[in-house]
Image (spheres, rainbow, N blue to C red):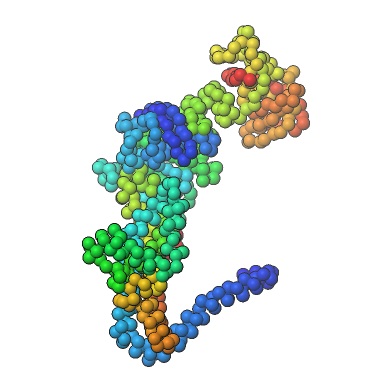
């Protein structure tokens, strides 16, 4: 169990405020947010590299708030892997074992398993300087996991890898962590990565946690306009709430299944995700194709409504329309997200 | 390369300037080394005073480099790793000995070594005298050599990413263990280079030493004395021997600290 409570850090002109996070053992959680939001500061203060000004951090039931990094039982994997260049792959991986009373038992029982899982068996005696980017990250992970940390911290671990490898290694690592039951925190600016790997995700902004939720909820039930804009794609269109709890927008009437926190008959901004707008040739409602981005299985169309406003629509890619063409569209939204305008 | 010379007329300017600089440095040195005959060189090597002066220069410089190693390493680490108010100022303080005219250094050191200064009182309690002693020579050499050691080693520590140290800490190594298992193995070459720089600067010091300790005579002071008393011919062989011994020593240290195998 990881429990960060009311953590505050002031650090080089940057302030982290009132961060509270609770994660069950074995969970994989992510922090996402724009550059400068404070994701890395959360990671570094959890690691003990940056002192907390107030609040507390508990890892695996121990209060580590005032412990130095070496006594927190954590593992760190950095973007640049930060391997010890003067040691071989094997020496890197075994580096932390001597500091743990049960280190040698693990050395016998656990290391071969780690090496096999991460496909490092043939590299043990190699120098780390000539490894590929993916190999380096696997060595860094093995090194962090060998002393069996209570929490694994990863700071943009895949961003220096190319896309194909990033996705493959990400899935691979998630599987290994789940198999070993390791609790892990991933800090990334890549939300696709966070969506694919995390059980829960925190969105950060200006040193604060905006929302802590599952990927599904961040996308479909964003708690703030910032989260709505930061997570996924979408457009805001103006609308009016009605007495009966529906929302009227240019494209029609949206019915909400969830109670809205807004006053009736108010002006609102409505978030339309690309999957809320579907292509339908029979629909009387039409829009002009302004731009298209081919994505393989689907095409993301930017559509111009008669009013001049724009919406996005994700359409199966066999519906291939030209820019400038008018196509029929229909609303199909399960979740209606509105913010006061 | 050859293309560069053909296409860019300014390349000739670069070539001429480079040639002038290299010639300016090497010509006088080569001329001096070529001047004395082998017989004079052998005779000078047998001169007990010359041997004693060069030996004194070498061991006092070595002691000052050792002091720089002990005191300068933690300080260089501090400058490399920590940001604190007044850091720029502190870095300028470290560079001061490079700026100050050499006789001024000697006079300044004498000012605190006297009995009417508390430093001088502590030193005399400990039985250390600076005026006219090897201890005084070491003090001067450490003063002028420290900036070279500290700056070189700071650059060496800068080249070790702090993330590597962070990882070591996270794996359970204390700050001290991290220094000896990670930082030192990656930065010790800069310490050797720093000591070489510090020693080279220390051996070459004349102006400050001549004020604090004319005797016992270090090699540069002896070369100066022989030049003023007997002239160029008589001072050259000592100078050539000093350069030869220093070059041999520094080459040895450089070889010793060279990376094994292809550079990583």
Q: Residue at x 64, y 26 (%)?
A: A235
Residue A258 drawn at (x, y percent): 55, 14
Q: Is residue A125 visible?
A: no
Q: Is residue A61 left or right of residue A123?
A: left
In-image side of A180 versus A192 (left or right): left
Is residue A326 at least partly visible in the picture? yes
Q: Is residue A200 above or below residue B253?
A: above
Q: How many numbered discs? A: 0
In this view, the residue farthest toward the front is: B116
Residue A325 in picture, x, y percent from top left: 77, 29
Residue B143 falls in image quadrant:
bottom left
The C terminus of chain B lies in which quarter of the figure? bottom left
Q: Can you give x and y, in whole percent of width and height, for residue A277 in the image?
A: 65, 23
Residue A186 point in image, percent of width and height: 45, 36
Residue at 34% of width from left, 66% of height from top?
B110
Location of residue A309 with respect to B117 vertically, above or below = above
- Identify the image quadrant of residue B260: bottom left
Q: Quadrant of the N terminus of chain B?
A: bottom right
Residue toward you, B183 or B26:
B26
Report the front residue among B104 and A17. B104
Q: Toward which corner of the image does residue B234 lie, by quadrant? A: bottom left
| Residue at (48% x, 29% y) in the render | A209
Q: Is residue B217 left or right of residue A227?
A: left
Residue for point 37% across, 91% down: B39
């Amino acid at each position: 169990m990881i429990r960060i409570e009311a953590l505050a850090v002031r650090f080089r002109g940057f302030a982290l405020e009132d961060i509270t996070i609770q994660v069950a053992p074995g969970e994989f959680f992510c922090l996402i947010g724009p550059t400068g939001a404070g994701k890395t500061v959360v990671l570094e203060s959890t690691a003990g590299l940056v002192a907390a000004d107030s609040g507390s951090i508990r890892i695996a039931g121990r209060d580590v708030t005032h412990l130095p990094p070496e006594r927190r039982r954590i593992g760190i994997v950095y973007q640049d892997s930060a391997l010890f260049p003067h040691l071989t792959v094997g020496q890197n991986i075994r580096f932390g074992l001597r500091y743990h009373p049960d280190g040698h038992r693990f050395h016998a029982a656990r290391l071969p398993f780690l090496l096999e899982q991460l496909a490092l068996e043939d590299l043990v005696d190699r120098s780390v300087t000539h490894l590929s980017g993916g190999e380096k990250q696997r060595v860094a992970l093995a090194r962090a996991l060998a002393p069996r940390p209570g929490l694994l911290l990863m700071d943009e671990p895949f961003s220096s890898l190319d896309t194909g490898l990033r996705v493959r290694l990400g899935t691979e690592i998630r599987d290994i962590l789940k198999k070993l039951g390791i609790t892990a925190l991933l800090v990334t600016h890549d939300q696709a990565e966070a969506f694919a790997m995390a059980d829960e995700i925190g969105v950060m902004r200006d040193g604060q946690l905006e929302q802590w939720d599952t990927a599904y909820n961040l996308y479909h039930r964003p708690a703030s306009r910032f989260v709505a804009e930061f997570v996924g794609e979408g457009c805001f269109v103006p609308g009016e709430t009605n007495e009966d709890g529906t929302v009227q927008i240019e494209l029609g009437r949206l019915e909400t299944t969830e109670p809205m926190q807004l006053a009736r008959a108010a002006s609102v901004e409505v978030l339309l995700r690309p999957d809320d707008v579907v292509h339908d040739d029979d629909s009387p409602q039409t829009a002009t194709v302004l731009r298209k981005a081919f994505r393989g299985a689907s095409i993301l169309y930017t559509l111009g409504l008669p009013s001049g406003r724009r919406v996005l629509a994700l359409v199966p890619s066999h519906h291939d329309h030209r820019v400038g063409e008018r196509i029929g569209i229909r609303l199909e939204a399960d979740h209606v997200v509105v913010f006061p305008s | 390369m050859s293309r560069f010379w053909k296409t860019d007329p300014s390349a000739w300017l670069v070539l001429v300037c480079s040639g002038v600089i290299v010639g300016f440095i090497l010509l006088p040195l080569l001329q001096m080394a070529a001047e004395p005959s082998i017989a004079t060189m052998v005779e000078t090597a047998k001169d007990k005073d010359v041997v004693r002066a060069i030996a004194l220069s070498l061991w006092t410089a070595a002691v000052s480099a050792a002091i720089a190693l002990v005191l300068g390493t933690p300080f260089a680490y501090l400058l490399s790793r920590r940001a604190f108010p007044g850091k720029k100022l502190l870095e300028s303080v470290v560079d001061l000995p490079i700026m100050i005219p050499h006789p001024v250094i000697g006079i300044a050191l004498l000012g605190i070594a006297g009995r009417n200064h508390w430093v001088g009182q502590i030193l005399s309690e400990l039985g250390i005298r600076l005026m006219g002693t090897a201890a005084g020579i070491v003090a001067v050499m450490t003063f002028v050599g420290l900036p070279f050691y500290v700056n070189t080693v700071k650059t060496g520590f800068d080249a070790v990413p702090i993330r590597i140290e962070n990882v070591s800490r996270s794996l359970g190594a204390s700050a001290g263990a991290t220094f000896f298992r990670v930082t030192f193995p990656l930065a010790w070459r800069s310490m050797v280079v720093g000591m070489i720089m510090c020693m080279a600067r220390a051996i070459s010091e004349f102006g400050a030493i001549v004020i604090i300790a004319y005797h016992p005579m270090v090699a540069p002071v002896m070369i100066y004395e022989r030049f003023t008393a007997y002239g160029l011919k008589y001072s050259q062989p000592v100078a050539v021997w000093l350069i030869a011994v220093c070059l041999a020593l520094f080459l040895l240290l450089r070889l010793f600290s060279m990376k094994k195998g292809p550079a990583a």
